[in-house]
Image (tube, rainbow, N blue to C red):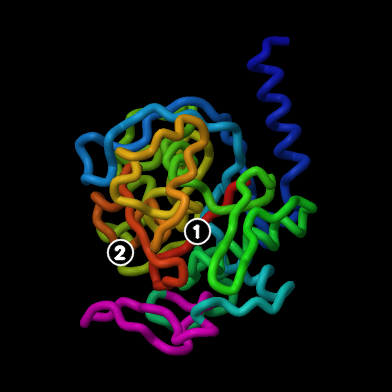
């Protein structure tokens, strides 16, 4: 048997071993074979360069953004209350701009209204980086993996070698969103045509859509461009690409004030939905176009 064929068989067997019995309540994880690639864009925004070669190890990434059903399973199992629930709600978009509304949480849509029953395949929104990391730890514990994140009263520590579920690094996100080893020089995740792979300002009709409706990329991942912004593990720094010397599995700065988000959303224009585009939010930020997906 050829080495490549043997590797593919092992990937499939490994995926079966670690897949969940209920795809509705738990994320479906897709294998991503690692390798070298060049994140960033020398012609993009200032924080997207310089382009440099990095190498990633193999990992798994969720096929879709985390859904209402999946987050609901976590909340019902743990009684967890999100930053929005413990704070002053979340931000929604109004004709007058962004407005924070009390009582708005992960159960709500873009206007801050609870989604009716049966619409739980929408991506969960109004969740902070902290909420997403707590969800990752719970997934790890459910499957017997060592959790990645350790929470302290005023900080969070992470051990990326733990093997549990976590948020993707920016490098992992861009590599997988671009198709991994099968990547082509697309501007967006899986196409040069944003309309066929993403819900964005030009077609979303001012709201997110159920996950998985648009064309998948080469790895079978949906909605990496558009629908909702996706939290990444990394601290964000505008000049990080220029400063970093990490050539293997880069994981961002050692500290910072904001976390990276990638992919753009239903409310954004094509520029924000590009594979190389970078943005950021405070770790406790939550709003109506911000969600996440997990890796392991």
Numbered disc 1: secondary structure:
loop
Residue 94 versus residue 276 in the image, above or below: below
Q: Is residue 18 above or below residue 259?
A: above
Look at discs 2 and 1 and give the one toward the viewer. 1
Decide whether residue 202 is among the magenta residues.
no
Tag 1 residue: 292
Q: Where residue 13 sits: x, y (%)? A: 75, 33
Q: At which x and y percent is residue 121?
A: 55, 64
Give coordinates of residue 220: x percent, y percent: 53, 40
* First of labels 2, 1 by sequence position: 2
185 to 234, vertically: above or below: above
Asked if labels 1 and 2 touch by Cβ distance under 8 angstroms, the answer is no
The image shows residue 79 at horizontal and vertical percentages of: 69, 79
In this view of the protein, can residue 213 be seen by the observer?
A: no
Q: Which of the pair 61/165 is nearer the observer?
A: 165
Q: Which stretch did the figure color magenta?
A: 85-109
Q: Residues within 10 Å of mark 2 (few under 14, many from 20)?
A: many
Q: Is residue 109 visible?
A: yes
Element under label 2? Answer: loop
Q: Residue at x 46, y 44 (%)?
A: 173
Q: Quadrant of residue 111?
A: bottom left
Q: Which mark is residue 267?
A: 2
Question: Which residue occupies 45% across, 55% down?
Answer: 255
Q: Is residue 260 left or right of residue 296?
A: left
Q: Which quarter of the image is occupied by the N terminus?
A: top right
């Amino acid at each position: 048997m050829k080495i490549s064929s043997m590797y593919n068989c092992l990937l499939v067997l490994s995926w079966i071993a670690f897949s969940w019995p209920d795809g509705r309540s738990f994320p479906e994880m897709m294998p991503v074979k690692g390798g070298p690639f060049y994140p960033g864009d020398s012609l993009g925004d200032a924080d997207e360069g310089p382009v440099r070669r990095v190498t990633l190890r193999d990992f798994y990434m969720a096929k879709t953004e985390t859904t209402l059903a999946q987050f609901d399973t976590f909340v019902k199992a743990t009684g967890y209350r999100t930053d929005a629930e413990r704070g002053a709600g979340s931000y929604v978009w109004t004709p007058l701009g962004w407005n924070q509304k009390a009582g708005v949480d992960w159960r709500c849509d873009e206007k801050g209204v609870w989604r009716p029953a049966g619409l739980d395949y929408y991506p969960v929104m109004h969740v902070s980086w902290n909420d997403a990391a707590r969800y990752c730890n719970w997934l790890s514990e459910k499957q017997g993996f060592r959790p990645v994140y350790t929470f302290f009263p005023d900080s969070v520590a992470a051990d990326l070698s733990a093997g549990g579920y976590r948020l993707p690094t920016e490098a992992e996100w861009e590599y997988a969103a671009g198709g991994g080893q099968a990547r082509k020089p697309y501007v967006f995740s899986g196409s040069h045509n944003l309309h066929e792979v993403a819900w964005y300002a030009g077609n979303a009709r001012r709201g997110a859509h159920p996950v998985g409706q648009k064309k998948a990329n080469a790895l079978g991942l949906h909605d990496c461009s558009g629908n909702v912004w996706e939290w990444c593990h990394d601290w964000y720094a505008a000049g990080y690409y220029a400063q970093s010397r990490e050539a293997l599995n880069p994981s961002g700065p050692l500290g910072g004030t904001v976390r990276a988000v990638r992919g753009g959303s239903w409310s954004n224009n094509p520029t924000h939905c590009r594979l190389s585009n970078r943005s950021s939010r405070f770790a406790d930020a939550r709003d109506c176009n911000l969600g996440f997906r997990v890796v392991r």
